[in-house]
Image (cartoon, grey):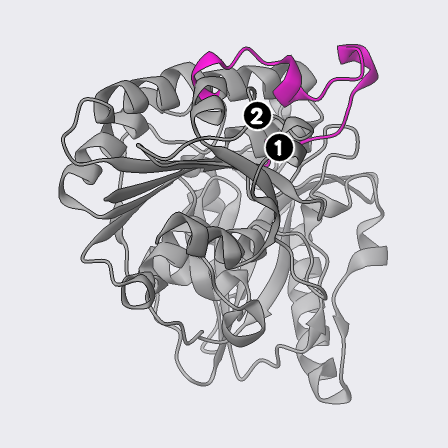
């Protein structure tokens, strides 16, 4: 048996008045996913353990069965693994967003989805201007970058920028959770203010403003941690080989620690215009030689953060006919059966433009196993599924048996 997880990041939602009180999943035309729901067994999964914020780092680790209390060391350290940046024993890693601030408020968490080329120029500039022997910036993808600090104290209260659009940035800057962390908090906040002074009139931002684009006029540092200690997924579930496919450094980094091969797909952007067909083919090819494939599609999450209902529906439909359909049609012809799971990591409701910790709907389809009475895939139909409500590792334990 082979195993495939298709994860539509953030595609769960809440009923929306303009859709006749349907969710985007209910409104979307997803015949292949509905077919798999009818063939398989369904349920709800609680991916956010008590005491954790509903971030993608938490939810994806939970989907893969990790005990967050034992392994979680912040988002930055996971992304560093994807980028090939080593985290030394005395170092703290953090996610470093490039964000847009307007009138003293966080306008968005992505600097208008800044391009890689523009972002890399800004990160290199910041490294030259305010990087040092102890503080270093590393360029990632679009608005998502990495920061490392030698001797940093991780006991900090940091606010993810996608949680607080429209909030005065000064109200959500880093706070120390312990007296020992105050020096670290002060240093990081000082870096943020310095970045604003440096970036506001940088040529990249002046060009962006001239054509009506948002400026990337501040860094935003969050999710601190040290190097995690994680047992590989292959060891835990006695798999020979596994692979991860994603446009997002966070998911690739989780894959690295989980012992999965990272497969790069040309044209994978993490946005609605990602290379869906390329990802589908990469998953098919990976399944030929791997026992387990984790296929992550970011697009619906970004649409949710933008509050764009129409775009979110479109990304869900793309997931159905440009990704799930070709994969399902191909693997259905194979002699060796492929178990397929489909789910989001967390909801990203368009109404609030950020993540919530509500349980997410999931499907597990095992060829030859009788399905349940669910016939379509959405947040409410899944409640009637035979799995009921699962928590954390129970999902992957039911998937891989």
- For the point 74% across and 17% down, the residue is 22
Evaluate whether residue 140 shows in this view: yes
Q: Which residues are magenta?
A: 9-33
In the image, 252: left or right of 220? left
Quick one: which residue is furthest to the front in this view? Answer: 370
Judging by the rendered image, the residue that carries numbered circle 2 is: 374
Q: Position of residue 385 (x, y in %)?
A: 59, 35
Q: Nearer the viewer, residue 362 or 241?
A: 362
125 displayed left or right of 252: right
- Say if mark 2 contacts mark 1, CB within 8 Å: yes
How far is mark 2 from mark 1, CA to CA?
A: 7 Å
Does the magenta run of residues contain 249? no
Q: Residue at x 49, y 72 (%)?
A: 71
- Crowding around mark 1 (Cα neighbors within 10 Å: few <14, some 14 to 19, many 20+) is many
Q: Quadrant of residue 329?
A: top left
Can you identify the residue that label 1 sits on? 382
Q: Is residue 124 above or below residue 165?
A: below
Q: Is residue 32 magenta?
A: yes
- Mark 1 falls on what kind of element? helix
Query: x, y percentage for residue 269?
Result: 41, 31
Tell me the residue at 57%/39% (across/down): 386
Q: Nearer the viewer, residue 330 or 212?
A: 330
**Residue 142: x percent and y percent?**
48, 39
């Amino acid at each position: 048996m082979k195993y495939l997880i298709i994860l539509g990041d953030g595609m769960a939602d809440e009923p929306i008045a303009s859709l006749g009180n349907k969710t985007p999943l209910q409104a979307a035309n997803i015949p292949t996913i509905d077919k798999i729901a009818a063939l398989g067994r369904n349920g709800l999964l609680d991916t956010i353990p008590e005491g954790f914020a509903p971030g993608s780092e938490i939810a994806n680790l939970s989907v893969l069965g990790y005990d967050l209390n034992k392994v979680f060391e912040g988002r930055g350290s996971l992304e560093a693994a994807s980028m090939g940046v080593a985290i030394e024993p005395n170092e703290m890693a953090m996610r470093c967003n490039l964000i847009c601030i307007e009138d003293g408020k966080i306008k968005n968490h992505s600097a208008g989805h800044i391009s890689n080329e523009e972002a890399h120029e800004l990160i290199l500039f910041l490294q030259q201007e305010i990087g040092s022997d102890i503080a270093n910036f590393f360029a990632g993808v679009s608005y998502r970058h990495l920061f490392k600090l030698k001797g940093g104290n991780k006991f900090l209260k940091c606010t993810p920028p996608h949680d607080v659009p429209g909030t005065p940035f000064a109200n959500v800057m880093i706070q120390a959770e312990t007296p020992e962390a105050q020096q670290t908090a002060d240093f990081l906040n000082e870096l943020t203010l310095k970045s604003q002074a440096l970036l506001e009139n940088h040529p990249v931002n002046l060009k962006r403003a001239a054509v009506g684009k948002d400026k990337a006029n501040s860094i935003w540092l969050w999710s601190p941690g040290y190097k995690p200690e994680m047992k590989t997924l292959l060891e835990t579930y006695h798999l020979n080989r596994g692979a991860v496919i994603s446009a997002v450094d966070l998911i690739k980094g989780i894959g690295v620690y989980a012992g999965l091969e990272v497969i790069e797909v040309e044209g994978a952007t993490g946005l609605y215009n990602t290379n869906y067909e390329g990802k589908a083919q990469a998953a098919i090819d990976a399944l030929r030689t791997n026992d387990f494939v984790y296929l992550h599609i970011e697009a619906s999450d970004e649409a949710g953060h933008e509050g764009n209902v129409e775009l979110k529906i479109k990304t869900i439909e793309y997931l159905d006919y440009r990704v799930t359909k070709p994969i399902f049609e191909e693997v259905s012809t194979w002699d060796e059966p492929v178990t397929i799971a489909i789910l989001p990591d967390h909801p990203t409701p368009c109404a609030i433009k950020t993540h919530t910790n509500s349980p997410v709907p999931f499907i597990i389809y095992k060829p030859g196993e009788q399905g349940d009475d669910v016939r379509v895939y959405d947040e409410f139909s899944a409640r009637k599924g035979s799995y009921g409500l699962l928590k954390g590792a129970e999902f992957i334990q039911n998937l891989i048996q």
